[in-house]
Image (cartoon, rainbow, N blue to C red):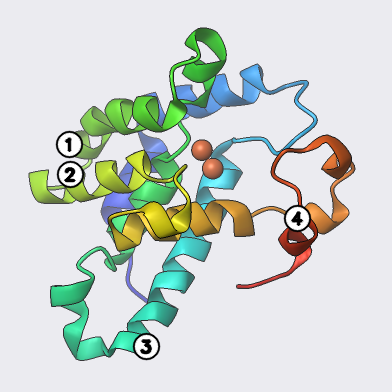
Amino acid sequence: MRSMPRVNLIIQHQSYEDYCRKNTQAEENRIYCRHGSDHGLTVSRIAYLYLLEKLLEVGVQDRQEQMPEIDKEIVYAAGLLHDIGRWVEYETQEDHALVSARISLPILRDCGFSSTEVEMIALGILEHRLSPDKTSSPLGQALALADDWARDCKNCPSQETCYKYSKSMEEIII
Ligand SMILES: [Fe+2]
Ligand SMILES: [Fe+2]
């Protein structure tokens, strides 16, 4: 099992903790899915599983060339940070994908990610709200899919009015 020292620095980072707390406060009365730190962690794990499955399809030897994003720390960093700007969207209506990508940058640098890695992670975060077939990066696609698969729609009491809900959302894919 590969340890993730830089990801563990993220979850201890003061800004990360502050933003997660602001999301929790802003969504205190939300009846739909919330976006606290647990959501980020779940999306990280599902996105990583998805990418590993894809890796098995393309062949492990092509990993670096075809999908450099399938680095455990890169995927987890992107998953943990993809919604950290939600609270800003509630205040200003700015798209939280843009906000989250932007406010992730100093955290990622503080935690030791290289500029190439930071770019890759920021692009994934920027793309996480796109339709999965419209993303330009495997990481963006993985986050977009994992974001849906992370929800327990079958047992959600708010499914009737949720814009995300459809019968197919009840299926467990991964
Ligand atoms: Fe999001
Ligand atoms: Fe999300």
Q: Do the residues labelled 3 and 1 touch (CB within 8 Å)?
A: no
C-alpha distance separating marks 3 and 4:
27 Å
Distance from disc 4 to disc 1, alpha carbons, whole Å, reads 33 Å
Of tags 1 and 2, the one toward the viewer is 2
Separation (CA) of disc 1 from disc 2: 11 Å
Three-letter code for the amino acid on which mark 1 is drawn: Arg
Whether tag 4 and tag 2 are in contact, CB under 8 A, the answer is: no
State the mark number for residue 56: 3
Residue lying furthest top in this view?
Answer: 92
Q: Earlier in the sequence, mark 1 or mark 2?
A: 1
Judging depth in this view, the residue of 129 and 50 nearest the camera is 129
Disc 1, SS: helix
Residue identifier under label 2: 119
- What residue is at 63 percent from the left and 25 percent from the top? 24
Q: What residue type is labelled 2?
A: Glu
- First in residue order: circle 4 vs circle 2: 2
Separation of marks 3 and 1 at Cα, in angstroms: 31 Å
Residue topped by disc 1:
109
Disc 3, SS: helix
Indicate if the residue with disc 4 has its beta carbon within 8 Å of ligand 2: no
Residue of label 4: 152
Instruction: Tell me the quarter of the image containing the C terminus.
Output: bottom right
Point 43% across, 46% down: residue: 128
Lower position in the chain sequence, tag 3 or tag 4:
3
